[in-house]
Amino acid sequence: MQSRTPVTRASGRPRSAEAAAAILAATREALVELGWSKLTLGDVATRAGVAKTTLYRRWAGKNELVVDAVAELFDELVLPDRGTLAADIEGVVLQFATILARPEARSGLMAVVAEATRDEALRERIRESIVTRQKRLVLEGRARAQARGELPPETDPLEAARTVDLIFDVVAGAVVHRTLVSAEPADEDWARGFTRVLLLGLKGASQSD
Amino acid sequence: MQSRTPVTRASGRPRSAEAAAAILAATREALVELGWSKLTLGDVATRAGVAKTTLYRRWAGKNELVVDAVAELFDELVLPDRGTLAADIEGVVLQFATILARPEARSGLMAVVAEATRDEALRERIRESIVTRQKRLVLEGRARAQARGELPPETDPLEAARTVDLIFDVVAGAVVHRTLVSAEPADEDWARGFTRVLLLGLKGASQSD
DNA sequence: CCATTACGCTACGACTCGTAGCGAAACCGC
DNA sequence: GCGGTTTCGCTACGAGTCGTAGCGTAATGG
């Protein structure tokens, strides 16, 4: 997740791990208080107790810094084993909603996505730091459901991969849109209704295949 | 959509309508070339051929200006009557994807959503300029499907309103997430698969009610 | 002990911000 | 026509941020 892990082992003074942690924490703190547009790297450096130049030596700019700061938040996600697929999905949806309720996640995530529309390298960074990383939840959930007999084992691996992508886009997209654009809470009632529609759709689609 | 429509009819020189159109067009052009973070109001004014002060007299800042510039893009959406609910939904999904393929829509929309996380007034402005405005598509689509007998007439009006909100969040959220976060094209294949899951889910949910 | 790298600090030109002040232009009611 | 009113274009301004360069110092490995 660091900006660059030197391939050739360096032989000088090592980079302070405390500094990196302090900078990322300070970035989230600044996102809460100031939001994306008013967040300045100079301010982050002051909060973290490091020199501004240190920050520029490690990150290319605001975009890369905030991606790293936000990516850490999503690592909190776990797939709780609640016994049924529906309950598992609801659990993840609610966890996701909880993270998105935090202001540093809201403004940070959307802002870097906006910047990424004009920056292929940043897009790739987001994909590997957040998207691909969290797709594990969908894979694990499906495996459990198949073990329980709630979902049939996939026949076509290509089709199965496409379904995973679809589910991820639908779940993440709906929660984000609900909380950030529609500005309504993604609470338990909403999660229940959403999960019901999604699950019925998936079961129906896999049956009529 | 203008920043303020004077309630008391003014009696001086009227604001130039051409200037407003030129400014919004210049804003979209600048979004394409520069993106959100590097877009400056001075540059927009120059492109539009107006003075910077004129711009500040009409809009409070970058946020409000871009909301208006982007909102115009979504007015292009129409609900094509393709004969079946599935085809209608696919049509809207593809139209939405087409708009989101334009760089000015991508970066502009996400950026203002990001800023809106810390600005209640801006959130409200987005809701009334974009969200509520486009929810008409869901309402019209449902009415047509009910006329065709594809969907049962709603019994509980409260439940029906909640379903409309859910559909809107799922459709818009999934398309946005697919194109902007996953960075994969929302093409016809994807639209077909998505529509199938959504429709099966909705029918199943309305039956077992 | 020496080479190497990271760090803190200061200073810098370039740029953007949002506002103020001015004279001219365009519209209203009389 | 003729004031009253509002907008417009233009210029100028202090304040703040950007990203970088330069320097001396601190921390590691050979």
Image (cartoon, coloured by chain):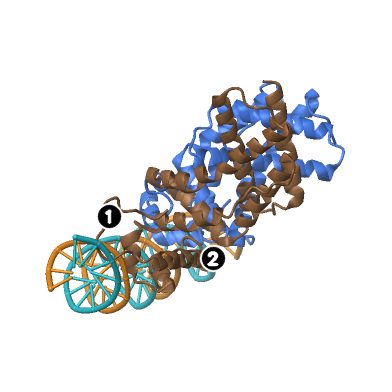
Chain colours: A brown, B blue, C orange, D cyan
Report the mark closest to the observer, 1 or 2. 1
What is the quadrant of residue B173 in the picture?
A: top right
Query: Residue at horizontal 56%, vertical 41%?
Result: B176
Residue corresponding to mark 2: A32
In the figure, B39 relative to A194: above or below?
below
| Residue A193 rendering spot, x and y as whole percentages | 76, 43
| Residue B80 rendering spot, x and y as whole percentages | 64, 27
Left or right of B71? Residue D22 is left
Disc 1 and disc 2: Cα gap in Å? 36 Å
Asked whether the viewer can see residue A43, the reply is yes
Residue corresponding to mark 1: A9
In the figure, A18 relative to B113: above or below?
below
Indicate the amino acid at tag 1: Arg
Question: Pointer 1: residues within 10 angstroms few (<14), some, or many (20+)?
Answer: few
- For the residue pair B23 and A67, the one nearer the viewer reads as A67
| Residue B209 rendering spot, x and y as whole percentages | 85, 36
In the figure, A52 relative to B63: above or below?
below
- Mark 1 on the same chain as mark 2: yes
Chain that bears disc 2 = A
1 and 2 marks in contact (CB < 8 Å): no
What is the quadrant of residue B81 in the picture?
A: top right
- For the residue pair A138 and A197, the one nearer the viewer reads as A138
Task: Tell me the element at label 2.
Answer: helix
Indicate the amino acid at tag 2: Val
Query: Residue at horizontal 64%, vertical 47%?
Result: A79
Task: Tell me the element at label 1.
Answer: loop
Question: Pointer 2: residues within 10 angstroms few (<14), some, or many (20+)?
Answer: many
Asked whether the viewer can see residue B15, the reply is no
